[in-house]
Image: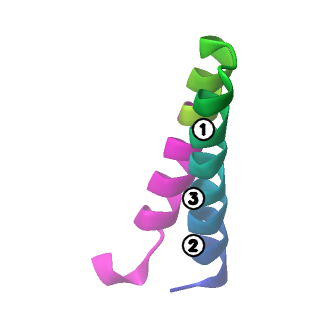
Amino acid sequence: MTGLSTVLIVVGLFLVGGIISFVKQGMPKQLIVLLSIGAAMCLVAGIMRLEVWN
């Protein structure tokens, strides 16, 4: 794992925690969707940068 892939995965997991928190608080759905898109992009980018695919 490179440093950047680790950072992207950690940020993605942090955003997933934010999604869970926002759902429990009853925040607007548009904000949850936007946060979900950001979390998915971070996780996918982190996973794609892993060196296991070579």
Image position, residue 7 (x, y; %)? 67, 71
Indicate the quadrant where residue 25 lies.
top right
Q: Are dots 3 and 2 in contact, CB under 8 Å?
A: no
Image position, residue 48 (x, y; %)? 42, 63
Residue at image mark 2: 5
Q: Residue 13 carries which label?
A: 3
Asked whether residue 53 is in view, the answer is: yes
Determine the secondary structure under disc 1: helix
* Protein image colouring: rainbow
Rounded to the nearest angstrom, the CA distance separating label 1 from label 2 is: 21 Å
Rounded to the nearest angstrom, the CA distance separating label 3 from label 1 is: 10 Å
Asked whether residue 54 is in view, the answer is: no
Q: Examine the structure image and report whether residue 45 is included in the region drawn in magenta.
A: yes
Q: Examine the structure image and report whether residue 9 is included in the region drawn in magenta.
A: no
Indicate the quadrant where residue 11 lies.
bottom right
Closer to viewer: mark 3 or mark 1: 1
In which quadrant will I find the C terminus?
bottom left
Determine the secondary structure under disc 2: helix
Amino acid at pointer 1: Ile
On screen, 26 above or below 35?
A: above
Please name the predominant secondary structure of the magenta segment in the image: helix
Amino acid at pointer 3: Leu
Q: Which mark is residue 19?
A: 1
- Residue interval drawn in magenta: 37-54
Residue at image coords 58%, 29%: 23
Residue at image coords 65%, 40%: 21
Tell whether 53 sits left or right of 31: left
Amino acid at pointer 2: Ser
